[in-house]
Image (cartoon, rainbow, N blue to C red):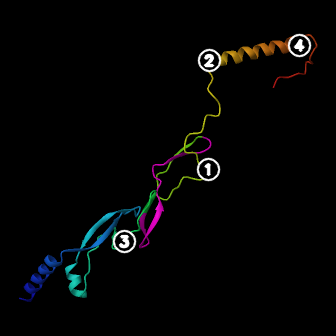
């Protein structure tokens, strides 16, 4: 008889109170806020303690996360919410042209980073331009040899 009264009371308690309280879920590895749900009362603990006790699953808390702005995420760490930078997916370039993609929470684009690839250090030359350079080098070499043979420059002259 006593057990059936407790069961009826628990059924009544769950039916009348139902869902109450909010839970805030976070990623098990990063602590990143994922969303909220409504908590359910723990009927046995509520009766034992004489106050509302909610069931809180793993990777959830009843602490309200701070509101994140652009490029921020709320993370749950050491039993509290923190706001950290979130530039995941952002691409920047180092001065030497190395492309970097941010893929972790908390990483930021370093000061002085380039948001676009730097221009190439040398312009690519066409085959025609390369041929002209070779011809000019040959002409210069022949002119130096001619001046040497005429004694107008010394034999110790060297090209750079």
Task: From the top left corner, tell me how far across and down residue 73 is, in percent.
Answer: 43, 61
Task: From the top left corner, tell me how far across and down residue 44 is, in percent.
Answer: 20, 82
| Image quadrant containing the N terminus | bottom left
Separation of disc 2 and disc 3 at Cα? 66 Å
* Vertical order, 34 against 45 (above or below): above
* Vertical order, 155 against 105 (above or below): above
Separation of disc 4 and disc 3 at Cα? 87 Å
Magenta run includes residue 49: no
Q: Nearer the viewer, mark 4 or mark 3?
A: 3
Task: From the top left corner, tell me how far across and down residue 25 is, in percent.
Answer: 33, 66
Mark positioned earlier in the residue sequence (1 or 3): 3
Pointers 1 and 3 in contact (C-beta within 8 Å): no
Separation of disc 1 and disc 4 at Cα? 52 Å
Pointers 2 and 3 in contact (C-beta within 8 Å): no
Pointers 1 and 4 in contact (C-beta within 8 Å): no
Figure quadrant of residue 114: top right
Separation of disc 2 and disc 4 at Cα? 30 Å
Say which residue label 3 marks. Answer: 64
How many numbered discs, if any?
A: 4
Mark positioned earlier in the residue sequence (2 or 4): 2
Residue 147, labelled with which disc? 4
Say which residue label 1 marks. Answer: 112
Question: Within 10 angstroms of label 1, few (less than 14), some, or many (20 or more) residues?
Answer: few
């Amino acid at each position: 008889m006593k057990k059936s009264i407790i069961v009826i009371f628990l059924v009544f308690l769950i039916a009348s109170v139902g869902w109450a309280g909010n839970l805030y879920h976070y990623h098990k590895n990063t602590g990143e806020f994922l969303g909220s749900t409504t908590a359910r009362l723990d009927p046995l603990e509520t009766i034992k303690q004489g106050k509302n006790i909610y069931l809180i699953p793993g990777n959830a808390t009843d602490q309200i996360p701070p509101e994140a702005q652009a490029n921020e995420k709320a993370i749950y760490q050491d039993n509290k919410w923190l706001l950290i930078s979130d530039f995941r997916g952002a691409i920047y370039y180092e001065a030497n042209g190395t492309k970097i993609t941010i893929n972790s929470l908390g990483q930021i684009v370093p000061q002085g980073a380039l948001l676009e690839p730097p221009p190439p250090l040398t312009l690519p030359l066409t085959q025609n331009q390369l041929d002209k350079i070779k011809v000019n080098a040959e002409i210069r070499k022949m002119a130096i040899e001619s001046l040497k043979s005429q004694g107008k420059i010394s034999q110790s002259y060297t090209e750079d």
